[in-house]
Amino acid sequence: MLAGDRLVTHAVRRNGPWTAILAVTAAGGAAGELALPYVAGRTVDAFVAAEPAAAEWLAGCAAVVACVVLCESLGVWAGGASGACAAARLRLRVLRHVLGAGPAVTRRFPEGELVTRAGLNAEEVGRAPESVTGALALLVPTAGAVVALTLIAPVLTLTLLAGIVLTLLVLNTFLRATTTIAGGYQEAQGELAAGLVEALDGARTIAAAGTAGREALRVLRPLPRLRLHGMRLWRANATAGVRAGLVVPLVEVAVLVVGGFMLAAGALTVGELYAAARYAVLGAALSGALGFVGGLARARAAAGRVAEVLAVPRPRHGTRTLPPGTGTVEFRDVTAADLSVPELVIPGGSVTAVIGRSGSGKSLLAALAARLADPDGGTVLLDGVPLPELARDELRRAVGYAFERPVLVGATIADAIALGDGPGVVRSVGVELDAVEVAAGAARADGFVRRLPHGYATRTADAPLSGGERQRLGLARAFAQGERLLVLDDATSSLDTVTEREVGRALTADHGGRTRLVVAHRLATAARADQVIWLEDGAVRGRGPHRELWRDPAYRAVFQVEQP
């Protein structure tokens, strides 16, 4: 919880002017409430004694009440604005971290879980400034009441202090219990969201199999736990409310009893007794912090969940640039998960196919070559430079990557190929429109793109793309970006045989001198490659031209199993 508490502290301290505005309005309102009993008491005494200044004291009472109402109104407005700004700032931080950390985050957290943590949980943390300032502001009338009662009659202060101690014990117990229960509630919310996202991702399969009812039960499986934690939160809040609520009347009655004896003995005036009763209520105002403490508990639990996402390390980049070269990739004593590659060199400018059964480590090898993942041990080098030592822009300019299911990032088709999100992105990344068209032509995408309503200017959201067309745009994006290395991870699986053959020829005949690393399932792709890396159980079992490896029955068996 330490990381979560630091995140809450950060949300309170780095909330721009809103925390200060909340503090000022809360302190102003508390000061007004603290002054009201004294002013009201003097007003009562003035009217009882028929003093000429009675009307002035009454006007003072009205002014104090107006000040309290104004501060509370401003506090409500500032609380909403503060929560929205703090949550937005934290969501942006989480989003940048998730995108920067890449697959390391998605391997640890399901997509629905990430949405919950960046959405609902970040919103809870955003309310922390209001909860903290509201709770601290209640200390003002409490401390003032202690001082005021001491000035009126020190013996009355002892009764108030006993009530304050009891209230603090109740609040501390409530904070600890609610933080734990709220954490369980938020965890169940995350599981529910993760199950829903998984079901939506496989909606076609569920519909085809006719298992909608069964999947609904699976998605809703966390509901009983959600209800259980919700009921526990309600019980904890109710129990603490009853305990804290009893303190106020007990303290007030005790002060009135002692003050009544002092009034009878002539040691107090009627106004002072009224003021003492009001200060007793104000002094026990900490019992009203229950709502703020509950909000703080939920924020702490949510912050702990958000902090887990932020704790996933982002890859660090160096400052080096690449020397002149042809894109030679070297693996030196690399270990990652179940993959072990003691020594492997992929010659610059060559076409290398990576084959193997499912789970053999093909995608992991490709990710390591493009630095979408870092090895647990060893080093991956591009033209003699370790990938972690390359500057971020240098690395991404040098390496192009195409996936099985590409996500098209950008407002238009041209932006998606140029890997941008605005009209000027094509130029800002140094890729002119003609280069985009050349890349699309190599991926056999130029033809269907030109048939779209606005060609390359068609908005991606409005383009009716099939799986194969989307995959060809992903290939075009890789062709347009990778200056030295192209990594294709099953990036042609949705293409028809003719298109796949044409794309394969474009890869083989690439005149840019780039190295091409292709995760392959089809026999034709391996046959066209300059060399094949054959993986089995996380290790390189064979390496060489396809025609030489083909002599091995075990190598041939890979294609017999894997061929669709």
Image (spheres, rainbow, N blue to C red):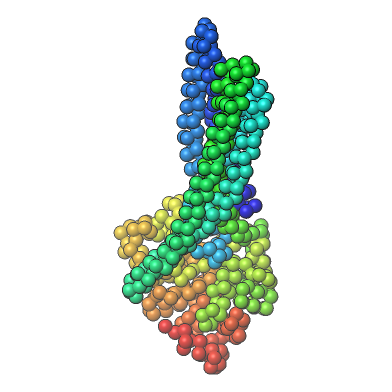
The x and y percentages for residue 363 are 54, 74
**In terms of depth relative to the viewer, which is nearer, 268 or 469?**
268
The x and y percentages for residue 237 are 51, 47
Residue farthest top in this picture: 52
Quadrant in which the C terminus is drawn:
bottom left
What's the residue at 66%, 31% (across, down)?
158
What's the residue at 34%, 75% (across, down)?
209
Residue 106 appears in the picture as rendered: yes
Query: In the rendered picture of this protein, how many numbered marks are placed on residues?
Result: 0
**In terms of depth relative to the viewer, which is nearer, 168 or 294?**
168
Residue 114 appears in the picture as rendered: no
What's the residue at 54%, 91% (across, down)?
554
Picture layout, residue 373 above or below residue 7: below
The x and y percentages for residue 22 are 54, 34
What's the residue at 48%, 19% (across, down)?
62
Quarter assignment of residue 555: bottom right
**In terms of depth relative to the viewer, which is nearer, 276 or 197?**
276
The x and y percentages for residue 245 are 53, 39
Picture layout, residue 536 above or below residue 269: below
**In terms of depth relative to the viewer, which is nearer, 514 or 212?**
212
